[in-house]
Image (cartoon, rainbow, N blue to C red):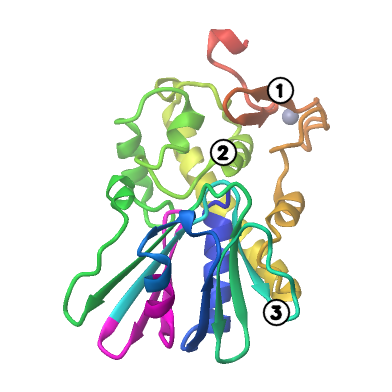
Amino acid sequence: MPEFPEIEAIRQYLILNISNEVISEVKTFQHTVIRNPSKDEFEILLQDAILDHIERIGKILLFKLHKSKLFLHLYIDHGLTGKLAWSSTSQKVPKRAVFSIKFRNGKILIYHDLKLHGTIWLFSCKNNQQCGYPQVIDKFGPDISQISESEFIERLKRFNGEIKRVLTNQKFITGIGNAYADEILFEAKIHPFNRRLQLNEKEKIRLYLTCQSILFTSISKISDMLSKTNKLDNQHYWRQQIFKIHLKGKEPCPVCGNPISTIKARRITNFCRKCQIPKNRNFI
Ligand SMILES: [Zn+2]
């Protein structure tokens, strides 16, 4: 599942490549992922629209478009396996393609989703009206890129349980998922299963600062790779280049050389037992 750094790097890259472009053709394939509107309406509404801007709400991308006096807001939640990619007329449409959008400059943006877990919404509204939006957004906490250190520490008080679970709870802050949480906690030297109540003040500050440094360094590295390759659906490669611990179970820890631990519950967690000291008796 793409997380804040990947979505943000994709957003910035797409703004450079397709903002102010006009849509010349829209095709839908797997309509089940498109929550609303209907297949026909989706294609008709987007046809001839101009892409004004792309925003990000947590891990959701928001394409803002208009045509005449109609405003269109296209939301993309990638879910577990959704991916945006460039396509061409000579290329075969991927098996689980959901939609493709062709721009007048010839670029074709395709969204495919292997497990069809993502969600797409398209809302339209006239001048001076408020466009609809996915209700899930109401539950989101502040964006990790927008929150101050004091606000972060203050909000932490409201969320109990293991710190990794808190960090990936989108009600606490939006943007961080399973993979980057492992990277952040490793860098901050905090054991993922330590409970929020067990964190001292220094660790809370370190956690905040590490979130910022890991996420912003990752955006910069991904943007660099994207501009060199123009490959949008290259998340696996980006992570291989950036990650120190996530999905690297049994490999030596890059700091101490101890083998990296893996705990597989609903999701995979990787950590170093030597660098990330457990405070929870179950993990000592
Ligand atoms: Zn280590």
Q: Is residue 220 magenta?
A: no
Residue 83 sits in which quadrant?
Answer: bottom right
* Residue topped by disc 3: 88
> Which dot, 2 or 1, sits closer to the camera?
2
Which residue is under mark 2? 178
Whether label 3 touches label 2, CB < 8 Å: no
Label 2's element?
helix
The amino acid beneath tag 3 is: Ser
- Ligand 1 quarter of the rendering: top right
Q: What is the magenta range?
A: 42-70
**Element under disc 1:** loop
Considering the image in quadrants, where does the C terminus appear? Answer: top right
- Whether residue 216 is visible, yes or no, is no
Q: CA distance from mark 2 to mark 1?
A: 21 Å
Q: Say which label, 2 or 1, has the lower sequence index.
A: 2
Q: In the image, which is nearer the foreground, mark 1 or mark 3?
A: 3
Q: Please give the name of the residue rendered at 62% of the width and 21% of the height, measured from the top-left corner.
A: 277
User: Could you tell me residue 16's position as x and y percent?
Assistant: 56, 81
Mark in front: 3 vs 2:
3
Give the residue displayed 58% in from the left and 82% down from the top.
Answer: 17
The answer to whether 194 appears left or right of 89 in the picture is left
Comparing 115 with 39, the one in front is: 39
Q: Nearer the viewer, residue 193 or 149?
A: 193
Sequence order check, earlier mark of 3 and 2: 3
Mark 1 Cβ inside 8 Å of ligand 1: yes
Q: Position of residue 61 (x, y in %)?
A: 45, 63
